[in-house]
Image: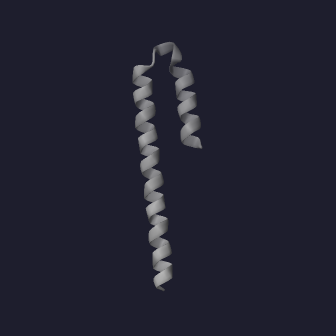
Amino acid sequence: MGRKEHLHKEHMRLLIHRRVRCEVLAVASALVLLYSSAPNAPSVIMSAAAVVGR
């Protein structure tokens, strides 16, 4: 019983950690989009999508 609870806690912590990482990546890509010039935007979006999709 105790071991199962521990595994569940560990799993939830990993899920939260992954979600936070995705949010950080989303914010970072948004900042990159803001700072990039208009002609570069499509390639920046594609690379950001590739990173988030990984």
Numbered-mark total? 0
**Above or below, comparing residue 24 to residue 41 in the picture:** below
Residue 45, how many percent across, how many down?
53, 28
**Is 6 left or right of 42, judged from the image as shown?**
left
Residue 44, how many percent across, how many down?
53, 25
Residue 5, how many percent across, how many down?
46, 78
- Quadrant containing the C terminus is top right
Residue 35, how many percent across, how many down?
40, 21
**Above or below, comparing residue 25 to residue 43 in the picture:** below
Q: Residue at x 47, y 45 (%)?
A: 22
**Above or below, comparing residue 28 to residue 18 in the picture:** above
Q: Residue at x 48, y 86 (%)?
A: 1
Q: How has the structure been colored for display?
A: one colour
Q: Residue at x 40, y 23 (%)?
A: 34
Q: Residue at x 46, y 84 (%)?
A: 2
**Is 14 left or right of 53, judged from the image as shown?**
left
